[in-house]
Image (tube, grey):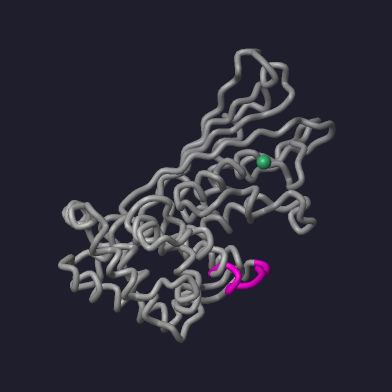
Amino acid sequence: MGTRFDGAARKAIDFAMIEVERRGHRALDPSHLLLGLLQASTGPIPDALRRIGVEIEAVRLTAAADLGGSGPAHGGRIDVARTTEAILQRSSEVSLARGSEVVSDLDILIAAAERMETAAGRALGAHALTAEALAAAAAHTSGAATATRSTAATTQTVHESRSARTGIGYDSHRFAAGGPLILGGVRIEADVHLAGHSDGDAIAHALTDAVLGAAAAGDIGEIFSDTDPANKGRDSIGMLRDAVERAQRLGWKVDHVDVVVVAETPRIGPHREAMRAALAPALGLLPESVAIKGKTNEGMGWIGRGEGIACIAVATLSSRAPA
Ligand code: MG
């Protein structure tokens, strides 16, 4: 039977994975894990640090300094470093020692503090956050035991509990003179195109944000910055595929998407099947699981005046079946 983590612990691990990605690193090291653990603004970790009298932000800065600068994302598989694995294994012994079968984020922090040979352990040590001090603070944090018990009652295994999530995305682009218009991965003959740093495909952009949102993996502006020359004229279907791969690395697969396009022109109906066929492979779906609907804005406002297009997308993701 695998280790069971409570909601805060899982969130910390998710955050740590995002840190690895964001920094273009290849492995989940204890320092990434520490940054993930220090993201919590409420719960056992902030409570314990407050009791010890240490500013969580100060520890976060020390941990971040250890990781150094960021490089470009490498887009490959992320490994879990052996030390990180050992810390996560040890955290279940820490939880058992306090009478819980479910590992909390503070249990992981205590296990990390025991590893003084790691940068994460030294960062904690620099703020006098030893395993003993943290364990003592945990024992004295009033209500902690009750909170742990109620969390234990509602927590399932990592796989069972991460069944489904929904993300929403929105995008708008202005029309500019000269075609063709790229929308939903389809090239539409028109006398206007969608202005933008990339190809302006508002459907693909809204979907990208919906997928990233469901995986809590950031947003399109953060990942594909419009000030980065590499993204100029970029194929938006490629960005969507990248977002789907990021979600996959965090353990999520896309099950279904639904898009509403609000525009006076072009009419979506004649292009719907081509768009579903163009978007489906990037999402890892069959076209049957890609829904696209067109609406006009009844002549109202900037959309009604034909100045541009708006898209709203919803993506449903489920946790990838355990291997
Ligand atoms: Mg856009």
The N terminus, quarter of image: bottom left
- Position in image of residue 315 (x %, y %): 45, 44
Q: Is residue 270 magenta?
A: no
Q: Could you tell me which quadrant the C terminus lies in?
A: bottom left
Residue at figure coordinates x 53%, y 62% from the top left: 58
**Residue 254 vertical placement versus 122 (above, below):** above
Q: Nearer the viewer, residue 306 or 170?
A: 170
What x and y, as percent, mark residue 294?
A: 56, 27
Residue at image location 19% in from the left, 69% down from the top: 98
Q: Quadrant of residue 205?
A: top right
- Furthest toward the top, the residue is 299
Residue 221 position in % (x across, y down): 65, 48
Q: Is residue 197 left or right of residue 104?
A: right
Most extreme residue toward the bottom is 117
Q: Is the residue 306 above or below the residue 258 in the image?
A: above
Q: Residue at 41% x, 71% y: name it.
A: 129
* Res. 281 visible in picture: no
Q: Which residues, given as a range, are shown in magenta?
A: 63-72
